[in-house]
Amino acid sequence: MAEVWTPMASAASLWADTAEPLPAFPKLAGEVKADVVIIGAGYTGLSAAHHIAKSGLSPVVLEANHPGWGASGRNGGVITAKFRLSFRDIDAAHGRAMARRMYEIAHESVEMVDELVSEFGIESARLTRSGQVKAAHNQATLKAAIDEAEWMKQEMGDTDVRILDAHQVREETGSRGFVGGVLNPGSGGIHPLNYLRGLAKGVAQRGVPIFQESPALALRRDGDGVIAETPGGSVRARQAIVATNSYSDLTSATVRLQRTLVPFRSALIATEKLSPNLAGSLMPTGRTYTETKRMMRWFRKVDDRVIFGGRGAFGKQDSESAFEALRRAMTGIFPELADVPLEFRWSGLVGMTLDSVPHVGRIDDRTLYSVGYNGAGVAMSSLMGRYLASLVRGEAVDLGLLDARRVRTIPFYSLREPAVRAVAGWYQFLDAIGR
């Protein structure tokens, strides 16, 4: 029996409410030929399409819903040059050369966002590079953050990182809830959905076909190429790229990648616009902020609203308890927001991996993929599009730890949700007792 597809609605978010209009893209009808068929019109897929087209090849992009429906339109819009695995841990486990290469990849990813915003003139993305502060909630986590920063200075040559005392973090955030912190100047923020829509518009204007509401229900070999089948037609291509990340289970064509990921729901809340006095006292520098608890929260201010996000929601749907937990955490840091109404609440799936780094490479000689951004995907997925284009052309790319040949599937995959809940519950307990 043929697979049945029903388009899904997007969660209401601040980004959707303030985004530029989405260009009208058709559904695929009939047969189309291309050099590369790309499944997924998020940052990865659109960046790959752009870089493939620049090299003279012809890509076609298939999107199950509409561009930006998935994580690319639901994230917090934070740009960081990092992985969930620290560079110090990479050095300890894999050596200095690997740590250096991963450091280079991380910084290249941030520059990739700058490059794409500039090339396509996406002013509405409102990209800033004002920096990010890691704010420590106790002396033990402050010491760990300082030790990491000093190691980065000495071993990676990252001399821009700055140590902040409690007073400086209070001036940065407007909160008395932190004992100090570390400032990384190269990080920044972006309007993630405007960035995505700007990419889609720019790529389409350069002649790349994008088909929305056209899920790849099947992806199969055909001679020396592949065929991607959709409800209304098919794409015959020499190679395929799967760029569906945590939404790889939407159809059977991409579900095999889901077994390499642990989808983790990330929830976000945004206040209504603050009064001028309150807006002026909270996060006046316009940076982005994270805290050092295991169940990490992050926050930033956009258009005089506080956006506050973090991990901890479970299941396939939005969670009322997760939103309430975020609000409690937000008012714990900023008591002044206790009476400020929330105007937006939304969530999306983060693709976590066993080794805490993304995976990019080949499934076979005709199919490539990139998934698993571990909560730092805006910049990294943009860069992976360029790496995928290089692999399509048969070029050698030093992928460091991201090389897909290192990937392992998740053991006992059916138990992933209870396992994630158990680990998260333990982390929440340790955070609650100040460990």
Image (cartoon, rainbow, N blue to C red):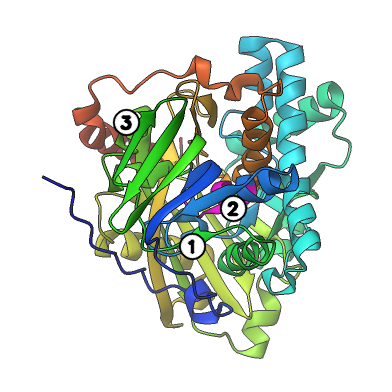
1 or 3: tag closer to the N-terminus: 1
Residue at 66 percent of width and 20 percent of height: 400
Q: 221 and 305: which one is in front?
A: 221
> How far is disc 1 from disc 3 in space, using C-alphas?
22 Å
Q: How many marks?
A: 3
Residue at 66 percent of width and 68 percent of height: 174
Residue 412 falls in image quadrant: top left
2 or 3: tag closer to the N-terminus: 2
Q: Is residue 183 visible?
A: no
Please state if 334 lies on the left or on the right of 391 as rendered. Answer: left
Residue 303 falls in image quadrant: bottom right
Quadrant in the picture for the N terminus: top left
Magenta segment: 40-47
Residue type (three-letter) at the residue carrying disc 2: Leu
Q: Can residue 32 be seen in this view?
A: yes
Q: Which mark is residue 256?
A: 3
Residue identified by numbered label 2: 46
Secondary structure, magenta segment, majority class:
helix
Measured from the top left, where is residue 229 in percent x and y?
A: 33, 46
- Tag 3: Cα neighbours inside 10 Å, few (<14), some, or many (≥20)? some
> How far is disc 1 from disc 2 in space, using C-alphas?
9 Å
Residue 46 falls within the magenta-colored stretch: yes
Q: What element carries label 2?
A: helix
Q: Residue 148 carries which label?
A: none
Residue type (three-letter) at the residue carrying disc 1: Pro
Residue identified by numbered label 1: 67
